[in-house]
Image (tube, grey):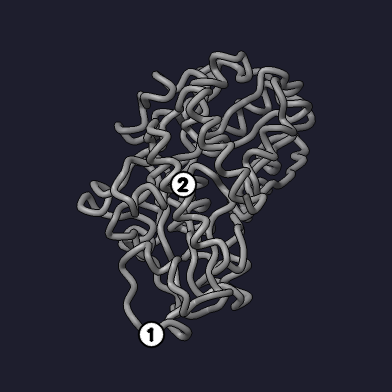
């Protein structure tokens, strides 16, 4: 195996890697990892640019892989440097967004739902309508993510999260405008806002509940997938075409796919990975938690976000910008 470069630059979501993952990689290889964080994927994409802009590895959502492939943004992977790719479960070996995992490796998968603080909200919540309930004014959050938040509204209206119907998008925008005066914030860092007590009920990626409970050292927060349905998605790990450290980058992807490293990652951040070989090392409580590892009945209520045509994506984005601007 060729020797790695001396440095590696990684750009990842906030709170989205186990505390031992990078140290164990640096112990294994003579590589210094520069690790930077983001909490808004669109801001991250703008910073990464066409070829990574000096970053080697990042973690885009699977829905974005087809357009990144087409644009030449990603480096085609050299599988001989990623032998641990055989650890992937069969459903992840040939994903539709990247056949054969030629340009990405699956990282973590997740569901989007709603969490609430049972010390503040005594009733059992089951619907997304909770985010429109004036009883919780000033203590509600929605995601700062146009696809996720429009998806929530579209599902509440009985539509697909991937609709191309502008009338349905207008209806979703009107619904979200009704909720806006009730909100405390739009945020993707729901862990911080819920731990701080400012938000009683809000949109959340399911596995963030694990982090909330760990930080508060109690189980006062409950997570549910709205009865109307919601989103299931996955994130990937990729190497950018402008990488200056391609060998180190491949070795890092291989490290992420090591069974024990992958399990350690899941045990720390609470997200399920695609690594079948890792399951024997994952905390049984996580495997049994429907917020992290839901059963088929729950998964059947969910939709994957699709890579929509640019013109359709602009329809979503323009309405989101109008909502955020107050228009």
Q: Quadrant of residue 183?
A: bottom right
Q: Quadrant of residue 219?
A: bottom left
Q: Nearer the viewer, residue 68 or 265?
A: 68
**Residue 138 point in image, percent of width and height:** 58, 74
Of residues 29 and 45, which is closer to you in this image?
A: 45
Residue 279 appearing in the image: no
Image quadrant containing the N terminus: top right
For the point 32% across and 77% down, which residue is it?
124
Give the number of the mark in front: 2 or 1.
2
Q: Residue at x 47, y 52 (%)?
A: 174
- Seen in the image, is 44 located left or right of residue 310? right
Residue drawn at x 43%, y 72% is 133
Determine crowd level at label 1: few under 14, some 14-19, many 20+ residues with C-alpha closer than 10 A: few
- CA gap, disc 2 and disc 1: 27 Å
Image location (x, y in percent) of residue 168: 38, 41
Q: Which residue is mark 1?
A: 122
Tell me the residue at 42%/42% (across/down).
Answer: 233
Label 1: which secondary element: loop
User: Which label is found at residue 150?
Assistant: 2
Task: Mark 2: give few (<14), some (14-19) or many (20+) Cα within 10 Å.
Answer: many
* 254, above or below 136, in the image: above
């Amino acid at each position: 195996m060729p020797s790695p470069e001396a440095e590696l630059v990684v750009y990842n979501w906030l709170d989205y890697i186990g505390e031992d993952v990078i140290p164990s990689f640096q112990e294994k290889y003579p590589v210094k990892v520069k690790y930077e964080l983001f909490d808004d994927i669109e801001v991250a994409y703008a910073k990464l640019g066409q070829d990574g802009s000096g970053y080697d590895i990042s973690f885009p959502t699977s829905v974005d892989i087809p357009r990144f492939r087409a644009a030449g943004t990603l480096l085609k992977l050299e599988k001989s440097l990623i032998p641990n790719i055989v650890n992937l479960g069969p459903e992840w070996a040939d994903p539709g967004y990247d056949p054969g995992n030629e340009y990405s490796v699956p990282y973590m998968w997740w569901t989007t739902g709603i969490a609430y603080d049972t010390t503040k909200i005594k009733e059992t919540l089951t619907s997304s309508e909770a985010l429109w309930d004036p009883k919780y004014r000033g203590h509600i959050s929605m995601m700062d993510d146009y696809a996720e938040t429009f998806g929530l509204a579209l599902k509440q209206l009985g539509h697909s999260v991937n609709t191309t119907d502008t009338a349905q998008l207008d209806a979703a925008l009107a619904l979200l405008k009704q909720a806006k005066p009730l909100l405390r914030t739009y945020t993707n860092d729901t862990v911080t806002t819920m731990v701080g007590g400012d938000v009683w009920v809000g949109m959340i990626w399911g596995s963030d509940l694990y982090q909330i409970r760990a930080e508060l050292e109690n189980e006062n927060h409950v997570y549910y997938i709205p009865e109307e349905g919601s989103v299931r998605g996955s994130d990937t790990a990729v190497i950018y075409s402008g990488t200056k450290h391609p060998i180190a980058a491949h070795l890092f992807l291989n490290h992420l796919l090591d069974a024990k490293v992958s399990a350690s990652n899941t045990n720390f951040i609470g997200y399920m990975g695609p690594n079948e070989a890792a399951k024997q090392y994952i905390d049984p409580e996580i495997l049994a938690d429907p917020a992290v590892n839901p059963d088929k009945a729950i998964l059947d209520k969910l939709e994957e976000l699709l890579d929509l045509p640019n013109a359709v994506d602009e329809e979503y984005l323009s309405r989101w910008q109008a909502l955020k601007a107050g228009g």
